[in-house]
Image: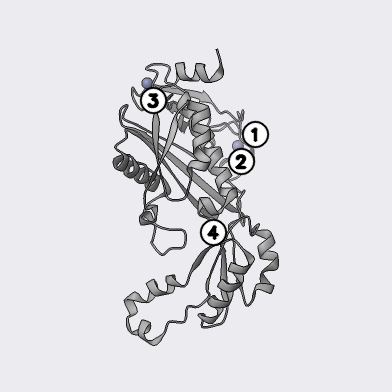
Amino acid sequence: MSVSQSIKQQCRYAGKSIALATKHKKADALALPLSAGLGAAVKTIEIDTDIFGTFLGEIERKKTPLLTAREKARLGMRKAKMPCGLASEGSFGSHISVPFVIANEEVVVFVDDELGIEISESIVTTKTNFAQMTVGSIHEAESFLLQTQFPSHALIARPNQYNANPIEKLLGRFFKKSAFKHIQKGLQTREALMAAVRASARNSADGLVRLETDMRAHMNPTRMRVIRQLGVKLARRLRSTCPECACPGFGATGVAGALPCQECGQPTESHAYEVSTCQKCHYTKSEKRRDGVIEEQSMHCLFCNP
Ligand SMILES: [Zn+2]
Ligand SMILES: [Zn+2]
């Protein structure tokens, strides 16, 4: 029996279509892991995902990435009238535990309304070109262009201090909107970048230009690779089934217990077990940490190192 045949016999999603809500060609990253891992076909459902907020802040993000991804997935499913769907959402900023390091967190939410389950997976990685710089001319940007992998990765240019004209100043509440009109996204050639830098400098009160990496998936191959890895993780999770009821998506949902301190043996705040709970029948299984750690260093102990 071939590998694909055995997947088809085992997996609930073999031969099924899954709606992928996206505006930025994420099927390029997610279709292969889900077809290879599950035998499922990803169907792109074009939705205007910008209504959920944009990286540049023209539209503010009001919800957590997880909730946003879930809403996107459901919107795509409604539009396509399909019972299964998924969507992903990325965010960028300081790493939670490593100071001064920039990280990319990607979350994906998969919904199966026939089974009544929602499965989410996430990845945190420092593999990102996320960066900004303020420059007076293109010549000052050379090291930034190298660092951000331009032109394989697109850039964004905008006036550093948007210089509103008198009419825009009068119409104060439209001011922000018109400032965003001067943002130029998706710059992928040196000619386009130079023209955008000149135009942004002209429209900037201080003559400076703010350059930023374009983090939209189809403009950023590094981010696309991270989303593909997340797709592999999701497929693996959906192949894992509940030992009790065989519902797909069985996997770690939380942590429990406390690791003992290696010096004094008192419980620390680090967890000892990983807990998996089935969304369907609520069967729960606790297992030792997958990283193999069984005791905590005394520097993290509240008794030894208060
Ligand atoms: Zn179950
Ligand atoms: Zn201790």
Which of the image's four quarters has the N terminus? Answer: top right
Q: Position of residue 62 (x, y in %)?
A: 36, 56
Q: Earlier in the sequence, mark 2 or mark 3?
A: 3
- Name the residue rendered at 56%, 43% in the picture: 226
The residue identified by callout 1 is: 263
The three-letter amino acid code for the residue at tag 4 is Asp
Query: 165 or 80: which is nearer to us?
Result: 80
Q: CA distance from mark 1 to mark 2?
A: 8 Å
Asked if residue 257 can be seen in this view, the reply is no
Q: CA distance from mark 3 to mark 1?
A: 36 Å
Q: CA distance from mark 1 to mark 4?
A: 48 Å
- Mark 4 Cα-neighbour bin, 10 Å: few <14, some 14–19, many ≥20: many
Q: Earlier in the sequence, mark 4 or mark 3?
A: 4
Mark 4, ligand 1, within 8 Å: the answer is: no
The residue identified by callout 2 is: 304
Q: Position of residue 87 (x, y in %)?
A: 42, 42
The answer to whether marks 3 and 1 mark residues whose Cβ atoms lie closer than 8 Å is no
Q: Secondary structure at mark 1?
A: loop
The residue identified by callout 3 is: 278
The residue identified by callout 4 is: 214
Mark 3, ligand 1, within 8 Å: the answer is: yes
Q: Secondary structure at mark 2?
A: loop
Mark 1, ligand 2, within 8 Å: the answer is: yes
The answer to whether marks 2 and 3 mark residues whose Cβ atoms lie closer than 8 Å is no
* Residue located farthest toward the bottom when viewing the structure as drawn: 166
The three-letter amino acid code for the residue at tag 3 is Cys
Mark 2, ligand 2, within 8 Å: the answer is: yes
Q: Earlier in the sequence, mark 3 or mark 1?
A: 1
Q: Secondary structure at mark 3?
A: loop
Asked if residue 279 can be seen in this view, the reply is yes
Residue 4 falls left or right of residue 180: right
